[in-house]
Amino acid sequence: MDYPFFFTWSAQNAVKPVELTGGEGAWFTTADGGRWLDLGSLSYQVNAGHGINYVNIAEVRTLPHLHELNIGHSIISRAITIGLPAAVKEMLSQMESYRG
């Protein structure tokens, strides 16, 4: 491979996808015969947000291993109609069973 795995925002449109053909443990292989150690798997975390709202939060809660839910946009939008304390309480009640 002649390019890095991490890119700046401005370079992402030029990224060529990596075709994975297999893997075992923290190692994966690519279509061009490369064998790579996935160091990201040692400390990987997933954050979700911006698109989470009061309608889809039930589905988001079914996703395992999320480290953080960023729900600020939705809460502030909802707060316009019901007030901030009520909007926060409503979202927290819908998120309370999530255990990651």
Image (cartoon, rainbow, N blue to C red):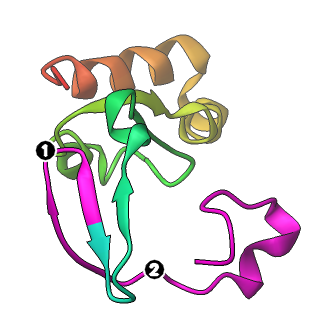
Check disc 2 and give the amino acid type. Answer: Val
Q: Residue at x 14, y 46 (%)?
A: 25
Where 75 falls versus 13 (above or below)? above
**Which element type, helix, strand or loop, lies under badge 1?**
loop
Q: Is residue 23 left or right of residue 20?
A: left
Q: Residues within 10 Å of mark 2 (few under 14, many from 20)?
A: few
Q: Residue at x 82, y 73 (%)?
A: 11
Q: Is residue 13 magenta?
A: yes
Residue contact between numbered discs 2 and 1, judged by CB atoms under 8 Å: no
Where 32 falls versus 57 (above or below)? below
Distance between mark 2 and mark 1 Cα atoms: 28 Å
As rendered, which of 23 and 57 lies closer to the eye?
23
Label 2 or label 1, whichever comes before in sequence order: 2
Q: Position of residue 76 (x, y in %)?
A: 64, 32
Q: Give the residue pinned by disc 1.
A: 62
**Which element type, helix, strand or loop, lies under badge 2?**
loop
As rendered, which of 7 and 83 lies closer to the eye?
7
Q: Position of residue 33 (x, y in %)?
A: 33, 83
Q: Is residue 7 left or right of residue 29?
A: right
Q: Name which quarter of the figure residue 12 lies in.
A: bottom right
Where 70 falls versus 37 (above or below)? above
Q: Position of residue 31 (x, y in %)?
A: 33, 88
Q: Give the residue pinned by disc 2.
A: 18
Q: Which residues are magenta?
A: 1-28
Q: Quadrant of the N terminus?
A: bottom right
Q: Is residue 51 left or right of residue 13?
A: left
As rendered, which of 39 and 50 lies closer to the eye?
39
Q: Quadrant of the C terminus?
A: top left
Q: Residue at x 44, y 48 (%)?
A: 52
Q: Position of residue 61 (x, y in %)?
A: 20, 39
Check disc 1 and give the amino acid type. Answer: Thr
Number of numbered markers: 2
